[in-house]
Structures are given as structure tokens and as C-alpha cells.
């Protein structure tokens, strides 16, 4: 039997805080009458490839996706094993600041497949020790939002020691996040310049502790990019921290009502096919074939697959 339809609608899980314009481009204008139609090959069927296909198809172009694996999705993929069990490629959670992904999901009818969690993050430590980072903050009947709800969460969490909390305060208090509280785009520009530095390097150089990385930031880094703080850039981590500090809903987690195959990647792939896009699985790209065009600009002839 098909899984029961989720009871939480798209209106309930959509982004509630305005995104930064520099990170949330407007929808493309409709193509001009008589505009050239392109034949486009997209190498890779992850979210970036699928999103690009949707945008191009909506503009009237001809699109084919070439994916080496037998399934779509990239890092957010899932597949079925021999017993029919759904196996996910990793942890899939959806923070409230994933504005571009929410827009893609809304376009393909997948947004209603997100289930809203309580506004708290749960850390399962060794030995069954469970701690929380709880963003829920109210005074009487009034809900307190960003940035105060985040300060409350980090100062009261039992996941970190008092010493680690003090080190966190020093590091984050000297970060571009402070500027972002009054100048979000300026803070984001400062954060972009840290792309070549790992979060561990940046955090420790600003007084952060290894205990904080082990107990809190590594788990969050794995949730964001499947890699630890030694390998994820400071830009990536500080971007999400800026959202947590400035947007109340950014730190709220959502999860899919089922496997990505059925509830995320599948609906987007259906959107692509319904608009004439072609998807080739088990078809990796070995080389892009091209000639030198006028002025040294390559003229693509095709793919070697």
C-alpha cells in the first residue's frame, strides 16, 4: 500500500523569514518571443543538475540529464536494496533557511512532503546520553525569536560544558555574524571571504575549543555536508550560523515523510520528464567533445558517454 499522505501542508513548512536577495535569485522572466532554444546536456543528476533542468525546461529549452549511477539524487539520493528496503545516502534534514530548495520542491509538488519537527536539535552521544539544543523560547504567551532564541539555546544546552560555552561566545562574538545582525548582506560578504579556510582553523583562531567541535559543530557539519569541521569551509558553517542568528525559522528542522526517492527526487524527476526532459541513468560522461570556435570560444559538439 502507498504511504499515507503527510498531514502537514506546504503552507505550514514554507520559509517564514525573508531570505537574503544575494542568496535567493528571483524567478527568471518568461523567454522573449522568438528567443533561441538551446539543446542542453547536464552531466550529473544530483539536486544541482535537476534544478538546472527544471529552470531550463521552464524556459523552453531541450534538456537531457546524464547520470552515471542507476539512480538520481547525488548526496540526497536513496535506493532500494534487494529486499526492497529504502537506503539513504546519508542524513537528510532540511533547515528552515533552505529557501531555494523549498522553491524547487514547491514547483514540483514535493514541498508538502516535509514534516515539521519541534524547534530543538537532539544530540545522541555515546552510551545513550541524549542532550538537546533547544531553541524554544517564550515569555508568557509571547514567542521570542532571533537572535534571542539562539542565545538562549546555546547558553542553556547541556551538550557543552561551561568552558566550551565561553569559548563559543568568544569565537562567534568576533565573527561576521555580529555585523550580520545589523547588516545581513555585509555580514554575508565577509563570510564569503572565508571560503578557503576550514571551520576548525577559523574557529580555533578565534578562541573556539576542540570540545565544542567534537560535541556540537562536527555533528552539525555532518548534517550540512557529510564532512567534519576539519574539511568543511568556514564560509559554509558561518553562513548557516548567520541564518540561525538572524532568522527565527532558519534553525527549525524538517524531514521527509519517506525516502528521497519517493518524496523528493522522484517528484522533481517527474517534473523534468513531464516537460519533455530526458534522463539517462547508468550513463556517465567521459568527455565533452568540442571544436575551437570563433575567438577561441569552444563550440560543444556532444558528449562521450
Image (spheres, rainbow, N blue to C red):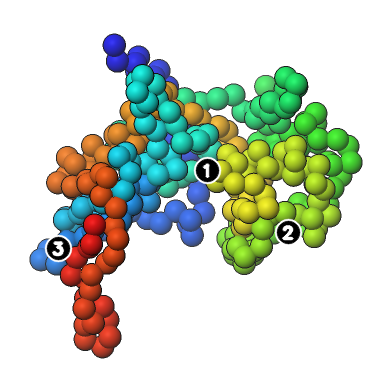
Q: Residue furthest front?
A: 82
Q: Secondary structure at mark 1?
A: loop
Q: Secondary structure at mark 3?
A: loop
Residue shown at 89% from the left, 41% from the top: 163
Mark 2, residue position: 202
Mark 1, residue position: 97
Identify the mark nearer the N-term, 2 or 1: 1
Mark 3, residue position: 37
Q: Is residue 165 above or below residue 176?
A: above
- Distance (Cα) linking label 1 and label 3: 34 Å
Q: Nearer the viewer, mark 2 or mark 1?
A: 2
Residue shown at 18% from the left, 70% from the top: 301
Label ID, residue 179: none
Q: Is residue 86 above or below residue 174?
A: above
- Distance (Cα) linking label 2 and label 3: 46 Å
Residue shown at 64% from the left, 47% from the top: 228
Q: Secondary structure at mark 2?
A: helix
Amino acid at each position: 500500500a502507498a504511504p499515507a499522505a503527510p498531514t502537514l501542508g506546504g503552507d505550514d513548512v514554507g520559509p517564514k523569514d525573508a531570505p537574503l536577495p544575494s542568496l535567493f535569485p528571483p524567478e527568471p522572466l518568461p523567454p522573449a518571443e522568438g528567443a533561441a532554444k538551446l539543446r542542453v546536456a547536464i552531466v550529473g543528476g544530483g539536486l544541482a543538475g535537476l534544478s538546472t533542468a527544471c529552470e531550463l525546461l521552464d524556459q523552453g529549452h531541450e534538456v537531457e540529464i546524464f547520470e552515471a549511477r542507476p539512480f538520481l539524487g547525488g548526496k540526497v539520493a536513496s535506493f532500494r536494496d534487494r529486499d526492497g528496503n529504502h537506503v539513504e545516502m546519508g542524513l537528510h534534514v532540511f533547515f528552515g533557511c533552505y529557501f531555494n530548495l523549498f522553491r524547487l520542491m514547491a514547483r514540483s509538488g514535493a514541498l508538502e512532503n516535509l514534516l515539521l519537527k519541534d524547534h530543538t536539535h537532539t544530540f545522541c552521544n555515546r552510551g545513550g546520553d541524549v542532550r538537546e539544543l533547544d531553541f524554544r523560547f517564550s515569555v508568557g504567551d509571547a514567542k521570542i525569536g532571533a537572535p534571542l532564541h539562539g542565545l538562549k539555546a546555546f547558553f542553556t544546552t547541556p551538550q557543552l560544558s561551561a568552558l566550551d560555552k565561553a569559548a563559543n561566545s568568544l569565537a562567534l562574538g568576533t565573527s561576521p555574524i555580529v555585523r550580520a545582525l545589523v547588516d545581513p548582506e555585509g555580514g554575508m560578504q565577509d563570510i564569503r571571504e572565508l571560503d578557503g579556510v576550514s571551520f576548525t582553523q577559523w574557529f580555533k583562531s578565534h578562541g573556539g575549543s576542540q570540545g565544542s567541535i567534537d560535541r556540537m559543530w562536527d555533528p552539525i557539519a555532518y548534517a550540512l555536508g557529510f564532512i567534519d569541521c576539519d574539511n568543511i569551509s568556514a564560509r559554509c558553517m558561518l553562513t548557516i550560523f548567520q541564518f540561525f542568528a538572524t532568522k527565527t525559522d532558519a534553525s527549525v528542522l524538517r524531514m521527509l515523510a519517506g525516502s528521497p526517492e519517493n518524496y523528493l527526487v522522484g517528484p522533481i524527476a517527474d517534473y523534468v520528464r513531464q516537460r519533455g526532459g530526458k534522463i539517462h541513468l547508468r550513463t556517465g560522461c567521459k568527455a565533452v567533445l568540442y571544436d575551437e570556435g570563433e575567438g577561441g570560444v569552444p563550440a560543444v559538439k556532444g558528449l562521450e558517454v
